[in-house]
Amino acid sequence: MRYLIAFLTLLSTATFAQDSTGYLEGNNVRALLSNRGVFFNDNSLGRPAYEFPKNSENHLVYANAFWFGAQTELGDLKIAAETYGVAGRDIYPGAITADGLAEAPETPYADDVYIISREEILFHSTNYTVWDYVAPDAITNWPAHGDVSMGLAENLAPFADLNGNGIYEPALGEYPEIRGDHAAYIILNDKGGLHTQTGGDPLGIEMHFMFYQYESADYLNNTTFVNLRVINRSSTNYPEFVVGNYMDADIGFAGDDQAGVSEDHSLVYAYNGDLTDEGTGPSPGYGENPPAIGIVGLNHVPAVYCLTDIEGMGDPVTPVDYWEALTGTGTCEVGDDPPGDRRMFMAAPSVSLNAGEVVCRDYAIINAWGGTPLENAAALEGIADDVIDFYAAEPNIYCEFFVSLPEKEEPITFELYPNPSNGSFAVTAEGNYDLSVFAIDGRLVYTKENNTGKTEIQLNVAVGTYVLVLENDAQQMTQKLVIQ
Ligand SMILES: [Ca+2]
Ligand SMILES: [Ca+2]
Ligand SMILES: [Ca+2]
Ligand SMILES: [Ca+2]
């Protein structure tokens, strides 16, 4: 944790509009999210806000933020980063223009924290035609589309386009496309204001965060996932682009913690450095044998791991300092320090992110409890492996869905007949295409690749509504499929 926060918060709140915040609390974790670019932190009180177990008043994270760095073809450096959101900021709410200028509208657009559950979506799907049904705000106001007249991209947050017309129509039963049982969607950018945190030049990126949780009887009930899509809305190509995840984990009381790295498991973690957590402020403390927490890279093996504290990472002050931290060229000493206030940082490998392109980074925040602090830390490795396997088995549609698809191509025309059907139907389309069918809860129930012309399908699934996805090299189309 940081100590000047209450004072600095007073200084900074005068200059910015009210933050939009919301709790994701779908399982045994209660996580505060905001459109401020700093997560799991109660910015107004300067307090940790990743509560585990829910309603215990004990927390495992003080703050979590993301760092973004890029180099242009000419070698110019671009940096956007947050730590605690109090000394300065680089990241702002809402979508930015898709015309290559990457400008933020005067009034931020699609700048809320949108929180929705699978249960609400299912209820919406079955009740949207009922005369007195009122859809939850997050379904009605889901930021599926940007205002094209403002220069924003047509497609922002993913949704189930059941009639395949490219338009989000909740009144026709369409709904947010989420992962997990509970999800929060937040759109941020780095062009909404000055970069007072790093002093870096903006990248012109739009960041789409989906935080999500599963209700479960196993470790998933203690896990929060993060799906991050970064879209380069600028007209500049970035041959090198890096995302880092900066977390100030506090296991209850911040002053007696330790941290570690497990490269074989794509994991950084923190645990209590002695046997007892004393608690702090309004937190009663975990007492003996407090839990450990870790962050896992799910769709990438991190290239950089760093521990200790922000000073130990080479005291990032200038944009070059941040770039060195992101690329692992700065100093980062783990050392044999006595227990204290630990921070963790991990960065993905550099990739290219050209104008208009999208990069996805997925993470899981896991914890382990039940043994001594060191045993809990060791148990995180097995949980990291499990969560990577779990993630890999999920249908991975979130990076491709809408945003990375060319928006100006002619839509693929295809026929689905009969629909509704008893499970026996045919799809006819031009060219070579892949077919998948998803249940309404996102489960993949059928897939067949490399089809041409007419494809006969016999589905043995429960009666209900499904989503057929037809995909070729260039595009993806969806159609509601009803089995009676
Ligand atoms: Ca539609
Ligand atoms: Ca502690
Ligand atoms: Ca202690
Ligand atoms: Ca800490």
Image (tube, helix red, strand yellow):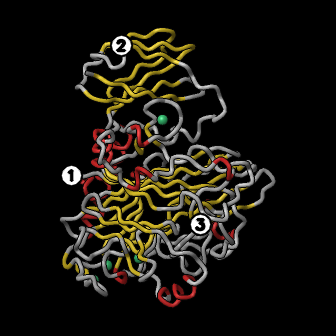
- Front position in the image: 393 or 419: 419
Is residue 57 among what the camera can see? yes
Ligand 4 position by quadrant: bottom left
Q: Does mark 1 have its CB less than 8 Å from ligand 2?
A: no
- Front position in the image: 33 or 326: 33
Residue type at numbered disc 3? Tyr
Q: Nearer the viewer, mark 1 or mark 3?
A: 3
Tell me the quarter of the image containing the N terminus: bottom left
Residue type at numbered disc 1? Asp
- Per the image, label 2 sits on a secondary structure element best described as strand
Q: Which residue is mark 2?
A: 425
Is residue 263 among what the camera can see? no
- Front position in the image: 55 or 300: 55
Q: Which residue is mark 1?
A: 218
Image point (34%, 24%), residue name: 446
Percent across and percent down for residue 368 are 26, 62
Q: Which mark is residue 92?
A: 3
- Label 2 crowding class (10 Å Cα cut-off): few <14, some 14-19, many 20+? some
